[in-house]
């Protein structure tokens, strides 16, 4: 019989026969790991953190820029463009934070599902004896 596998970190392997409480088995392996989900959540949080100082960096870069440029209409638009970018960066930060939370929820939900499946196998094994 061919085993069923969910790709993840190597440390998350369990034999299906172990799930139902029987020794031996035909080598089927159920692999599950939360590693990929947690790495993705950390990456999203990293992006959020990386975007945090952008507003203050934009402020510093624009300090004194408009002084003495009253006749240049292109520079007059610079403030509106800057505000637009600040909104976009803040929205991206919010999305990254929300994504990190959702990815961690997947880890939690998968763990709960694994426990439910394990319990259901144990019930089937108990009836078969």
Image (cartoon, grey):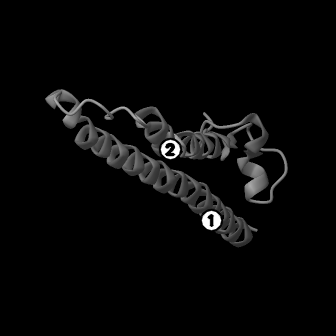
Label 2's element? helix
Left or right of 31, for residue 93: left
In what quadrant of the picture does the C terminus appear? Answer: bottom right
Mark 2 or 1 closer to N-term?
2
Q: Say which quarter of the image contains residue 39.
A: top right
Image mark for residue 58: none
| Residue depicted at 16% across the width and 29% down the height | 71
Could you tell whether 117 is left or right of 66 in the image? Answer: right
Name which residue lies at 20% across and 34% down: 70
Residue at figure coordinates x 36%, y 45% from the top left: 86
64 over 122 or under it: above or below: above
Q: Nearer the viewer, residue 69 or 53?
A: 69
Residue 58 percent across, percent down from the top left? 44, 38
Number of the label disc, if any, that sits on residue 56: 2
Q: Is residue 68 visible?
A: yes
* Front one among 110 and 68: 68
As measured in the structure, the alpha-carbon distance from the residue carrying label 2 to the one carrying label 1 is 42 Å
Identify residue for label 1: 112
């Amino acid at each position: 019989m061919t085993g069923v596998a969910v790709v993840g970190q190597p440390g998350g392997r369990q034999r299906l026969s172990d799930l139902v409480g029987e020794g031996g088995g035909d080598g089927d392996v159920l692999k599950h790991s939360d590693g990929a989900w947690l790495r993705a959540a950390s990456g999203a949080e990293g992006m959020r953190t990386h975007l945090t100082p952008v507003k203050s960096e934009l402020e510093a870069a624009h300090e004194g820029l408009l002084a003495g440029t009253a006749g240049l209409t292109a520079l007059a638009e610079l403030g509106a463009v800057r505000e637009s970018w600040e909104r976009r960066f803040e929205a991206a930060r919010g999305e990254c934070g929300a994504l990190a939370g959702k990815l961690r929820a997947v880890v939690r939900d998968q763990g709960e599902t694994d426990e439910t499946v394990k319990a259901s196998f144990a019930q089937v094994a108990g009836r078969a004896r």
